[in-house]
Image (tube, rainbow, N blue to C red):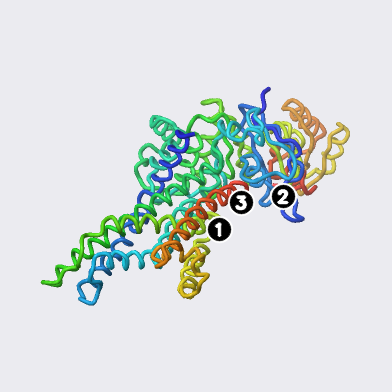
């Protein structure tokens, strides 16, 4: 089983060679970095390191995380849709769920990598931003622990959105379907931010890690992670059983 | 004789449309088996059923003696396949595409060079697939299907879109596989003339039902070659033919004998015509085309060349 999954994951990694994956992995943290530098350098940004960490995490969780999940899942799925590769991949002497799980592992691993890079980019933006403000520094210590904790918790809470996007991207051959779904989810999240029920909206779960109520933050983290894991399992089981035309 | 593919009463419907309607296939091991039919006859649906990509409403599939439903992975472990025309992974090189398969099937890297040499792609192996011609992509797809030395190769329309040279290459490759590696090749196509040159067994499918299955020569024997005699004395020659018990008819400036005749019988018949003083300006055999036979079997229409 382990040897089979290792082979499948290695194959999935190789399929991504020379794809847009590198652009995706680098561009998101770069955006966070540039935005952070501009905010800090303007002199009107956060005065303390923890505030910078949280504002960067807010941008990531509210907008960039769902958009990254949308783009990444669509990219991974299109490798097969675009090359009519499902007929080959799913006719191999492996269970179909194993083939799909290998793709899910890649998606989750790349999301985790981008999360860490976004956290690093956020800290780096504070350091670089300070260079433009002689005599003014962000107060407090570098919030490395806070940043890692926020990214990890947001990653867990955002797992449900990643799973939703994954299932849709694999199910539909058209690139447009998961992209439209992702944009719509992010748009509705903007509207739902102020609503009490917004806490349970999958596209807002990662952002609600920053909720002032620690109990609510823990609740969304558990809901997002357990819900995401459950949807991955149910979604992959469903996709494995359906016909592949 | 062992059987590479056996299906019993395979059925698959889409709404009220019966795409595959009770197909019983028996593909002998070591054969090149042509699965022939027009577009929309149910070839690709049958292949998807054989590979477990879609589920049958009824019936069962055995690949190399293993039931697909009961032991899917084991049944597919000796099978390589091309379904429709895969574009493979255009961002990868040919060698990398095969490396993906080597990871998937846990094969050694030496297997990559082996299959590349079979399809004659060694020199182009390090070029990106997006730069490959359609023929090269098809050959790479065959190479990928050959990874791991499968006992059974299932190819869906492998000559689709290829130019005549590409088709000839593919024909040579497919015909050589049973001898070179003992592989059974199940190949679907709507290009009947091409399949006539490539296969030794075949099944004809129309509207989801098999209309013939067996050796190609048994199929061809159902419509023997026509013996054409060019003569201005059509009625006289027809009389002689009928007197000899031959199934004949008069055409434009010729008499057509629709009956199997060996060389001696043909020579004897021509001597009979000459002995009665009738001039013959030419005589030749017109081989029956698989296309004609297919149309005859499926529509009852006879098509002349």
Q: Residue at x 20, y 76 (%)?
A: A43
Residue at (37, 54) in percent of width and height:
A152
Indicate the position of residue B304 as horizontal and vertical percent values. 72, 47
Decide if residue A123 is in sight here. Answer: yes
Q: Chain of mark 3?
A: A
Residue A67 visible, this orientation: no
- In the shown orientation, is residue B38 left or right of residue A152? right
In terms of image quadrants, where is residue A9?
Answer: top left
The residue that disc 2 covers is B19
- Looking at marks 3 and 1 on the same chain, the residue that comes earlier in the sequence is marked by 1
Q: Percent x, y for residue B271? A: 77, 29
Give the foreground label among 3 and 2.
3
Task: Tell me how far mark 3 sits from mark 2, CA to CA.
Answer: 13 Å
**Disc 3 vs disc 2: Cβ atoms closer than 8 Å?**
no
Q: Closer to the observer: label 3 or label 1?
A: 1
Identify the subunit bearing mark 1: A
**From the viewer's perspective, is residue A174 above or below residue B84?**
below
- Residue under pointer 3: A245
Q: Do pointers 3 and 1 mark residues of a single chain?
A: yes
Left of B204 or right of it: where is B111? left
Q: Real-space Cα distance between discs 3 and 1? A: 11 Å
**Disc 2 on helix, strand or loop?**
strand
The lab-note entry on whether marks 3 and 2 share a chain reads no
A92 left or right, relative to B258: left
Q: Are marks 1 and 2 on the same chain?
A: no
Q: Which residue is mark 1?
A: A172
Q: Residue furthest right?
A: B243
């Amino acid at each position: 089983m382990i040897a089979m999954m290792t082979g499948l994951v290695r194959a999935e990694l190789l399929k991504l060679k020379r794809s847009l994956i590198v652009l995706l992995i680098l561009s998101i943290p770069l955006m966070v970095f540039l935005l952070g530098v501009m905010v800090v350098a303007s002199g009107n940004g956060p005065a303390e390191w923890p505030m910078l960490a949280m504002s960067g995490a807010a941008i990531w969780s509210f907008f960039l995380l769902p958009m990254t999940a949308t783009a990444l899942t669509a990219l991974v799925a299109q490798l097969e849709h675009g090359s009519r590769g499902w007929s080959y991949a799913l006719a191999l002497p492996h269970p179909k769920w194993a083939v799909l799980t290998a793709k899910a592992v890649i998606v989750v691993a790349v999301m985790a990598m981008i999360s860490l890079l976004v956290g690093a980019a956020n800290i780096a933006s504070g350091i670089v931003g300070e260079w433009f403000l002689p005599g003014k520094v962000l107060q407090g210590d570098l919030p490395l622990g806070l940043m890692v904790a926020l990214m990890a918790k947001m990653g867990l809470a955002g797992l449900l959105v990643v799973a939703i996007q994954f299932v849709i991207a694999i199910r539909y051959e058209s690139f447009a379907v998961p992209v439209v779904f992702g944009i719509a989810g992010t748009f509705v999240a903007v509207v739902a931010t102020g609503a009490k029920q917004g806490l349970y909206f999958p596209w807002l779960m990662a952002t609600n890690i920053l909720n002032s109520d620690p109990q609510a933050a823990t609740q969304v983290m558990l809901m997002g992670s357990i819900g995401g894991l459950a949807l991955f399992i149910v979604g992959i089981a469903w996709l494995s059983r359906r016909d592949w035309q | 004789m062992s059987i590479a593919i056996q299906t019993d009463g395979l059925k698959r419907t889409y709404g009220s449309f019966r795409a595959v309607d009770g197909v019983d296939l028996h593909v002998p091991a070591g054969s090149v088996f042509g699965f022939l039919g027009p577009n929309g006859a149910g070839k690709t649906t049958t292949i998807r059923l054989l590979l477990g990509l879609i589920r049958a409403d009824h019936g069962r599939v055995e690949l190399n003696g293993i039931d697909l439903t009961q032991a899917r992975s084991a049944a597919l472990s000796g099978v390589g396949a091309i379904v429709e025309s895969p574009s493979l992974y255009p961002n990868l090189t040919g060698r990398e595409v095969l490396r993906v398969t080597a990871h998937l099937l846990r094969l050694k890297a030496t297997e990559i060079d082996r299959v590349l040499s079979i399809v004659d792609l060694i020199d182009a192996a390090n070029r990106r697939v997006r730069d490959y011609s359609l023929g090269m992509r098809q050959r790479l797809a065959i190479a990928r299907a050959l990874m791991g030395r499968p006992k059974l190769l299932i190819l869906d329309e492998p000559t689709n879109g290829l130019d005549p040279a590409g088709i000839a290459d593919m024909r040579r490759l497919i015909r050589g596989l049973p001898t070179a590696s003992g592989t059974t090749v199940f190949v679907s196509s709507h290009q009947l003339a091409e399949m006539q040159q490539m296969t030794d067994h075949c099944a004809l499918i129309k509207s989801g039902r098999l209309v013939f299955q067996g050796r190609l020569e048994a199929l061809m024997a159902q419509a023997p070659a026509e013996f054409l005699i060019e003569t201005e004395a059509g009625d006289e020659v027809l009389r002689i033919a009928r007197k000899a018990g031959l199934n004949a008819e008069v055409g434009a400036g010729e008499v057509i004998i629709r009956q199997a005749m060996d060389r001696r019988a043909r020579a004897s018949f021509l001597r009979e015509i000459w002995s009665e003083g009738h001039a013959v300006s030419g005589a030749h055999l017109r081989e029956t085309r698989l296309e004609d036979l297919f149309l005859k079997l499926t529509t009852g229409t006879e098509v002349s060349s």
